[in-house]
Image: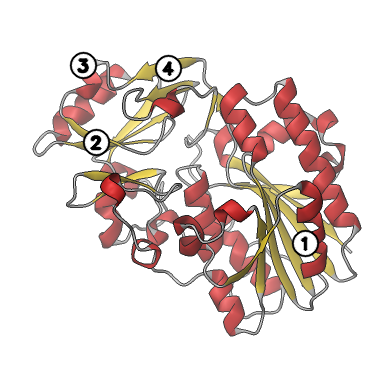
Amino acid sequence: MLTPGYGGGSLTDLPDSLLAALGLRGPNALALEPADRVCLFLVDGLGADLLRAHPEAAPFLSGLAGRTLTAGFPATTVTSLCSLGTGLTPGEHGMLGLMLAVPGTGHLFNCLRWTLPGHQVMDPEEWQPATTVYQRAAEAGIQSVYVAPAEFEGTGLTQAVYRGVRYASAETVDERVARVHEAMRERPAHVTVYYGDLDAMGHMVGWGGDDWLRQLAIVDDMAQRIAEGLPPGSALYITADHGMVNATEKIDAESVPELAEGVALLGGEARARHVYARPGAAKQVLESWRATLRDKAWVVSREEAVESGWFGPRVRDAWLERIGDVVAVPHTDLAITASATHPFEALFTGYHGSLTPAEQHVPLLEVRT
């Protein structure tokens, strides 16, 4: 088990370190060197172990100096984006997984698509009330710029984790590179650019195959082009939100009686399941899940997950009930699916979320001009 290195070796430590490099007062846990302009290239799904396995597909990235960070738990996009957007651990910012129970409602909330049953609306500032690093930068006179596809602009997730940015819509790689170079002309500059197709390909066909490697080559070329157009005094950092594993086994938790009994809601995702028990059934659900998955997953109670520091040194009291009564985290290449409730996810090949090195390790690569 790889417990995230909160406090000096995780994604949570990166945003404040980037602001410190720009001269803002605050922690610099990663000891980043000063720069006039900072760009963060966030590649969804670019695990450090995955990149090291295929240096031939990414010669530019593989030749850069850098280090390895841990993503945080769960190793999933919504959690990592919120850690990068706030500089807080998951236990502090409350984005504790992909699909979380809304306490007292009996419903799951999809934190990525920002959807609730019955067309109900979740207020982004209510679900994630913490001040973002972009708001803090703005208070110091630095306008942060976020470069990403137009479809994400104005979404609930964007409002929750990117409050304070100037959104620069860009669809193609060419457009994203151009928007980055435009934004980096400012001084100081604080720019983030997002690329998500590597992760999408990994989910559909698995990481390491030809289609995935072609996406990795696109990422490599994009990083090199961004680096080559940076003005003097710039620092480019390349990182990811999580890694990935290819599932070689799937268990449908809704069709296995031992896993379905006593369960009210099945949240999280296939590699980091939040299991919400019916009233009075938490102990029985914990015992049954442990017995069924004993050689394939770490299965703990909510209290054990919190005390073990999976979500950070502490979890705010207000967020505790967002965590499952039982948390099930595979350590083999197992995916715990729910084909009736979450049918699309059940079709994936690549998954992430767990506490294995392949999912937790993300690169932090650096280019300076």
**CA neighbours of label 1 inside 10 A, class few (<14), some (14 to 19), many (20+):** many
Whether residue 207 appears in this view of the structure is yes
Q: Of helix, strand and loop, which one carries label 1?
A: helix
Residue at image mark 2: 265
Which one is in front, 87 or 104? 104
Picture coordinates of residue 181, whole percent (x, y):
82, 63
Q: Give the CA distance from mark 2 to mark 1.
A: 42 Å
Q: Which mark is residue 250?
A: 4
Is mark 3 in CB contact (under 8 Å) with mark 1? no
Q: Of helix, strand and loop, which one carries label 3?
A: helix
Q: Give the CA distance from mark 1 to mark 4.
A: 41 Å
Q: Give the CA distance from mark 3 to mark 1.
A: 52 Å
Q: Of helix, strand and loop, which one carries label 4?
A: strand
Q: Which mark is residue 257?
A: 3
Residue at image mark 1: 180
Question: Mark 1 or mark 4: which is in front?
Answer: 1
Answer above or below: position of 111 versus 269: below
Q: Residue at x 28, y 17 (%)?
A: 292
**CA neighbours of label 2 inside 10 A, class few (<14), some (14 to 19), many (20+):** some
**CA neighbours of label 3 inside 10 A, class few (<14), some (14 to 19), many (20+):** few
Residue type at mark 4 is Lys
